[in-house]
Amino acid sequence: MLGLIATLLVVAMIAGVLGFGGLAGAAVELSKMIFSVAIVLFLITALVSLVRGRTAVRRKHPVMVSGDDDRRS
């Protein structure tokens, strides 16, 4: 999403330099709208993660039990 914002801003700058005011304005407005959506989604995600709290991390490998030392290579 942020890549799209950067692309639209580059298009707006190029269009502005070349004198295409309408296209530059449209690209800037689209970029502003997408940036606003990205900020809102980030804030919602941050709020939800704060409310849920930290979850337990599951281990990928079981803990080695004593006596399994001689099975190691």
Image: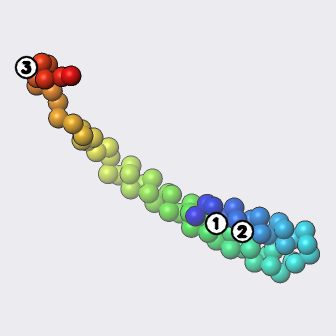
Disc on the earlier residue, 3 or 2: 2
Are dots 1 and 3 in contact, CB under 8 Å? no
Q: Residue furthest bottom?
A: 22
User: In the depicted view, which residue is nearer to us: 40 or 20?
Assistant: 20
Q: How far across and how far down the image is residue 45, in percent?
A: 44, 57
Amino acid carrying mark 3 in the image: Gly
Is residue 66 at least partly visible in the picture?
no
Q: Quadrant of the C terminus?
A: top left
Amino acid carrying mark 2 in the image: Leu
Name the disc covering residue 30, or none.
none
Name the disc covering residue 4, or none.
1
Determine the secondary structure under disc 1: helix
Determine the secondary structure under disc 3: loop
Measured Cα–Cα span from mark 1 to mark 2: 6 Å
Q: Nearer the viewer, mark 1 or mark 3?
A: 3
Estimate how packed mark 3 is, as few (under 14), some (14 to 19) or many (20 or more) residues with alpha carbons within 10 Å.
few
